[in-house]
Image (tube, grey):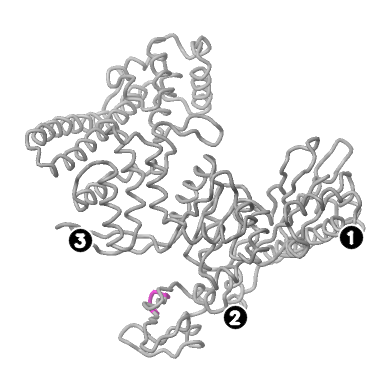
Amino acid sequence: MPLPVEDVKAQIPLVDVVNAAVRLQQSGRYLKGLCPFHEEKTPSFFVFPERGTWRCFGCGRGGDVISFVMERDKAPFVQAVESLAREAGITLSKQEERQRSRNQILSQINLEAAQLYHRLLNESPEAAHARDYLAERGIEQETLARFMLGYAPNRFDTVRKHLVQLGFAPEDLTAVGLLTEGNRGPLDRFRGRIMFPIRDARGRFCGFGARTLSAEIQPKYLNTPQTPIFDKSGLLYGLDLAQQSIRERKQCIIVEGYTDVMMAHQHGETNVVASMGTALTEKHVKSVKSLTTNLVLALDPDAAGSAATLRGLEVARRAFDRVDTQVTVGDIMRLESTLEADIRIAVLPEDKDPDEVLREGNGAWQNCIDTAVPFVDYAFRMIARQHDLSSMQGKRRAVEALAPLITDIGDPVARQQYLKRLAQVLDLGVQSEVLMNLMHARRPTRRAAPMRQNGGEQPSENGQERAVDGLEQYLLGLLIVHPRARGLAGEVIDAEDFHQPLFRQAYEYVLAAGGNGAASVEEVEAESVHALLDRLRRERSIEPQIDEEYLRPTVVAAALRLKRRNVQEEYEDLQLLLASEHATENKPLSSQIRQEIRRIGEQLRQVNRALKQTSFIRTS
C-alpha cells in the first residue's frame, strides 16, 4: 500500500512542525535554534525552509519533516507518515483503506494462530518433547512467553478448524500462509513443529518460523511464504522488542537465528535482532538505521558465516547514508563520499554460535561485542586469506576489495593509517597519498567486484559460475548460437582473455568446433563445460536474434570490450607497480615500467579506436 509521502511533505511545512518543538530565530535565509534532541547552550540546529530540510551540527542528526517526526516521537517511518497525514487531513483512497483493512484481518489471523500454538505448547501432552527440547536449550518460561513460542500438532486440521470456528474465511487462512493445498483440499502448513511467531517493528503478527524435532518431518525449518504482510527480506526477528533498547544503547547487534535472539534477551542483551537465517538486505538495514547508525554483525564464525558477514557488510554500506566532504590528498583536491555509520564485526569463538557464547556466561558475549573490530579490519583479515598477495593480480584484487571500504572512513587520520597498512600488507612501500590517488582513479565500473569471495570466480546463488562483469558470458553466448562468427572473435582475443577457467575452457572448445553449429554443444565430454554451454545456449535462444547485417559489428565489439577490460587491468597493475618501485627509488626498473605503461597505453588507445569504428562495420 503506497503511503502519501509526497503529499504529506507538500502540505505540512517543516517550519510549522519544528516551531511546535523548537523556538526558531531568523538567521539570513535560514532559521536556527537549540536542538531538541540533545542538550546545548549555543544554537546548532538549523532549518532550511527552501529545501524543506533540517540539520543539527552538534549531534549530526538531520533530514526532512518525516525524519523530524521520527526523531521527535521515536516512531518508525510508516507511523510518522501516518501521523503527519492525519494532521494534514490526507485520507487514504478506498482501495488503500480496503487493503489496510484486509492486512489487519490477516494480522489478526496470525495473532489468533499464535495464541493457539502458544497454548498448545504449554498444555498439550503432544508438545512434551518440544518443552523438553526448549528447556535443554536453556530457554526460560518467561522468555517463551515474551516471544510467544508455540507448538503445532502433527495433524492436518488443528489451525484450520480453530480459526474457521472463530469466523475467519479459509481463503484468508491460505492467503496468510497458514494453509496449503493438499490432495483433499486445504490443510495446515505447519505440523509437528515448534512455532516462532514473527512480528514487525510495530508488534503486528506477520508470519511464522517453524522447526521440526523429528527426522521424519522435512524440511527442518519452514517459514511462512511471501504474503501481503510477510516479507522475510525486510523483517528482523525481535525488532519490536529490541527497538527501545537499540535507541538507548545506540547500537544494534544482528545475529542469524531465533534462539540467538531469545537467549540474548534472556541475558539482558535486548538490543539484539536476527535476519532469520537469510542474507542481510538493504531493507533490514533501513529498518534499524532510524534507530541507530552503530551496527554490529555477529554471524556464525564458519566459512559460510564469514562469507555472509562480508555480504552483509557490503549491504550495510549501501544502505547507510553518506556525506560528501572536500579533502586534499597531496596536491589533489576532490570531494569524497564517506559513510555516516559505525559498522563493526563481532568475531565469535570458533565452532560457537551466539546462543552458545551467551550461555557460556563469564562475560564472554560482552567481550565479543566490546572487541568487535571495525569493518575495515575484518575485511583486511578476510581478504588477506582469500588472495595471493605475492602476485600482482592478487594485490590488484585486494586493492579492489579494500579501496571502497577505506574511502568510506570519515576520519581522515584513521583513513591515512589504513592506507599505510594497505601499503604494508601488499608490500608496496608506497606513500599513502600516492596510493589514495591511485585508488580514487580506478574505474568506477570495477566496483562490481569488491566483495569477491576468493581469488578467482565466485559462485552465484544457484551454484552456477558468476560472470563478474558479464562480458565473458555475453560473448560466449553469442558464439554458441552464431558459429559463423567465431572466427571474428578469434582475431581479437584468445582464451587467456577469459578470467574464469570454466569460461576459458568453454571458449577453447567453441573455437575448436569452428562453424559446426550450436548442436555441437551436445558433443562436449566435460560435464561442467557442457552444462555451461547448454545454459548459455538456452539463455541466448529466448532473446531476439541478431540480424546478419549487425552480427559482425556486435561480435567484434563484444570481443573488443573484453580485450579492453584486460588491457585496462594490465595498465592499472603497472601503475600500481610503478608507485611501489618509485618509492624504492629503483630508477632503472621504474624506467622500464614507464616504458611498458606507454606501450600498454597505446594498445588501449588502439582498442578504443577500434571500438568506435565497429559502429560503421557492415557485413558485405
Task: Indicate which disc, 2 or 3, sits on the residue closer to the N terminus.
Answer: 2
Q: Amino acid at mark 2?
A: Glu
Mark 2 secondary-structure assignment: helix
The disc at residue 328 is: 3
Report how many numbered discs are placed on residues in the image: 3
Mark 1 secondary-structure assignment: loop
**Which corner quadrant holds the N terminus?**
bottom right
Nearer mark to the viewer, of 1 and 2: 1
**Which corner quadrant holds the C terminus?**
top left
Image coordinates for residue 472, horizontal then vertical, percent: 39, 28
The disc at residue 87 is: 2
Task: Indicate which disc, 1 or 2, sits on the residue closer to the N terminus.
Answer: 2
Q: Nearer the viewer, residue 167 or 453?
A: 453
Q: Amino acid at mark 3?
A: Thr
Q: Residues within 10 Å of mark 3 (few under 14, many from 20)?
A: few
* 405 within the magenta span: no
The disc at residue 167 is: 1
Above or below residue 473? Residue 102 is below
* Marks 3/1: CA–CA distance: 69 Å
Q: What stretch of residues is rendered in magenta? A: 48-53
Q: Residues within 10 Å of mark 2 (few under 14, many from 20)?
A: few
